[in-house]
Image (spheres, rainbow, N blue to C red):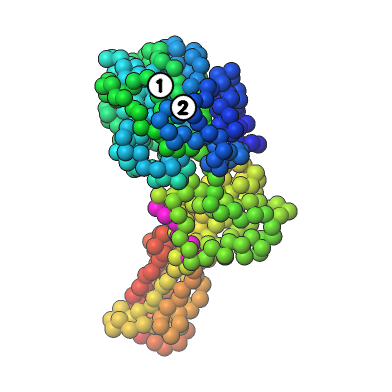
Amino acid sequence: MAYSDDISGLGADHHWAFDGDALDGIGSANGTNTGCVFSGSAIAEDATNCMTTNGVGDRISIPTTTTINNSAQARKAVAGWFEFSAINQPFTRIYGEGNNTTNFQIVAGFGNVLTLEVRDGATWQVQVYTDRPLVANRAYHVAAILEGSAYGNEVRFYLDGVEQTNAIPADRQPDDASLAARGVAEFGDPAGTVGLDGTALLMVAPVNGNFNHWCAWGDEADAVLTETEVRETLFERGALADVTISSGTESAMQTALDAYADTVRGDAPVCIEVEAVSGGGDFSLDLDNITFNSKASCHVRYNGTSDTLTIRNTNGSDCSIVSAPFGGSIELRTEVSVKVTAKDASTGSVITGARVLLEADTGGPLTAGTDIISTTTDGSGEAEVTFDFESDQPVTGRVRKGSSSVYYQTASLGGSITADGYNVNALMVRDE
């Protein structure tokens, strides 16, 4: 299903793909273009081009309509993809309805920090800020949601599907039934005088950036978007990936992924996307020392509509954010060391040939009793295996040596395998 269909499926009243024009793909609120161009590269799925603003006065003006701006609304939502092409130092407005007195607007300032301001005259105001500046030439998805006091009584702001909580007031509650009617909606440099905190600011600096797939919901139940709808449908389904591992045999796809071994993936909406294996079915791929920028929003996305992809972190890979928003599923494993060292409780010397049995206990992803280690210690007194870590796995077990001298009493094992692995010294008491 195309991303435009995903947006429509969430009940949006309006959708401006900004793919070659400013037409409304769902409603009749077609935009009027002043100075914007539509020849830039797309910044989201299901688009060929994007809309660019880079000069004073560049804007798309949206006709006045009750589902957007010219009536009081107890619920509303606006969402879309935006990419800065430069660092915007003065206050600039990416999207907005109204003026400095009554508004619903997304504003950039302080080096590309975004502010969602919802203000109803002198009655109430909520401002929510992104937790970091947005870097240039990197696409982001934003979603702004208002729910009046009869509903969630909150203003919510999302960046790449993650709710932002830095706000004034801290509870982000309007404590009022609705937001009053506002002036015309605009993308880019506003035509009139607008402002922040009720103070008029003449925002005449250009908004240097690109737009794709903006949509709006009016005063209706669909406007109360859930966190899952914002993250999985609007962000994860719409994000472009830096790298695609195309469908093929499992071995061919592993070879394609190995081409990125020993690399650091950058700050991106989605770093690596993986298509379904040819012929269908569950499959596994190993990441070989592939690490990820801490600001990347999704490390690996599985695009399959069914079946399960298992991703394994090996050799220092640190994938931790995965998604499967199209109907399949993805499981994440990290290769960790599980080691038991047998030592003499009196002398501290290692014990060779001790029998180690370590099993899964209840409370973890493995079935209780599943063998994890079943072997004897080597010349260093160690019994070690690699383990695909999914979540904390409680373990139980024992170490014994009674087949040849020196004999030892049985030592018990316990604890859990964690993301750091499992490394235990079994102190054994002589039995002779």
Total count of labels: 2
Q: Quadrant of the C terminus?
A: bottom left
309 is higher (above) or lower (below) than 198: below
| Nearest to the observer: residue 126 or residue 345 | 126
Q: Secondary structure at mark 2?
A: strand
Q: Quadrant of the N terminus?
A: top right
| Nearest to the observer: residue 204 or residue 214 | 204
- Using the image, tell me which numbered label, if any, was put on residue 191: 1
Image position, residue 302 (x, y; %): 58, 49
Image quadrant in which you'd find residue 243: bottom right
Q: Quick check: 219 left or right of 117?
A: right
Q: Secondary structure at mark 1?
A: loop
Q: Which residues are magenta?
A: 288-294
Image position, residue 58 (x, y; %): 45, 29
Q: Quick check: 229 left or right of 112?
A: right
| Residue for badge 2 | 59
